Amino acid sequence: MAIQSFILANWPILAFFAVHWQLSVFVQTFFLHRYGAHRMFTMSHGWERFFHLLTYVSQGSGYLSPRGYAILHRMHHAFSDTEKDPHSPIFHTNAMAMMLKTKHIYDGFAYGKVQPEPRFEGGYPEWDALDKLGQNWFARIGWGAAYVLFYMAFVQDMWLYALLPVHFIMGPVHGAIVNWGGHKYGYRNYDDVPDVSVNSLPFDFLTGGELFQNNHHKFGASVNFAARKWELDPTYPVIRVLAAVGIITLKNEQKMRYPAPAQGASEAPTAAVA
Ligand SMILES: [Zn+2]
Ligand SMILES: [Zn+2]
């Protein structure tokens, strides 16, 4: 079998790609998004440092600082699919153009060249030394070189080298998939959400639950991104386990509900803006 022999020959590369992808997705949705940008749960200073370091190690050369991520993401919620949205597919002809504009805005905040509106600042993890290391080009090139060396040691089918650019900018690649696909391809549970957000995958194995954009824009404070019985947000069970063993403490959990309670119903939860 051709596929079998391909997997047998290249399994270290395939395993490395899968682990790098899933770890990078996990820290983005768990630490940068749900914790850093939305404060859906709390953790001790020690655990915050641990997950901040895990974010750096997981994303490597494609590291996104919690501050830069949080400011951009809070702007996205406030201005979703309007001209002030830092990344809306409706203003771009392709995902690459949107990604480059997002990078430009992110760099402005991450390197302190642009000041955000005060309401988008604060409450995210801050670790100056690590963020500086994450932005250092020698360190970035070092990570990139490590990925290349790993490939050189194990690759059997040369075309697999084409996967290397994904490793180099893993964090931004996931951001682009979510921000492009999650506002373009899929179905809507909540038509009253005033943007074009959709849910792309009923079981989001690709980006750890991030592709439930329509659900998330409706119930921005819900730690579970899935709303319907047949939807599965794979990061949510992990969060429940981390809460059960005392590593994190969930805040008053907003319940995502499908169908949504009627407008004005007294028990209707309010969607958080940030
Ligand atoms: Zn969105
Ligand atoms: Zn969000």
Image (cartoon, rainbow, N blue to C red):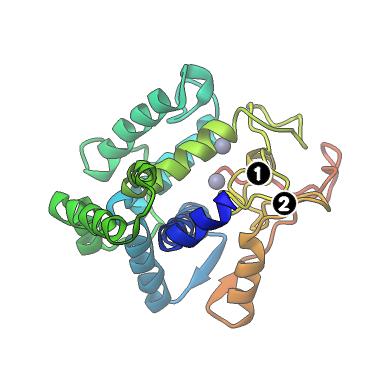
Q: In terms of secondary structure, where does tag 1 sit?
A: loop
Q: Nearer the viewer, residue 36 or 96?
A: 96
Marks 2/1 in contact by CB < 8 Å: the verdict is yes
Q: Position of residue 91 (x, y in %)?
A: 48, 18
| Residue 221 shown left or right of residue 92 in the figure | right
Asked which quadrant contains residue 71, the reply is top left
Seen in the image, is 101 located left or right of residue 270? left
Residue holding disc 1: 212
Q: Answer yes or no: disc 2 within 8 Å of ligand 2.
A: no
Residue 167, position as x, y percentages in the image: 35, 49
Kind of residue at badge 2? Ala
Residue at 66 percent of width and 54 percent of height: 222
Q: Tell me, yes or no, if residue 119 can be seen here.
A: no
Is 8 above or below relative to 170? Answer: below
Instruction: Give the image quarter of residue 238.
Output: bottom right
Residue 55 is tagged as none
Residue located beneath label 2 in the image: 226
Q: Residue at x 51, y 24 (%)?
A: 89
Q: CA distance from mark 2 to mark 1?
A: 7 Å
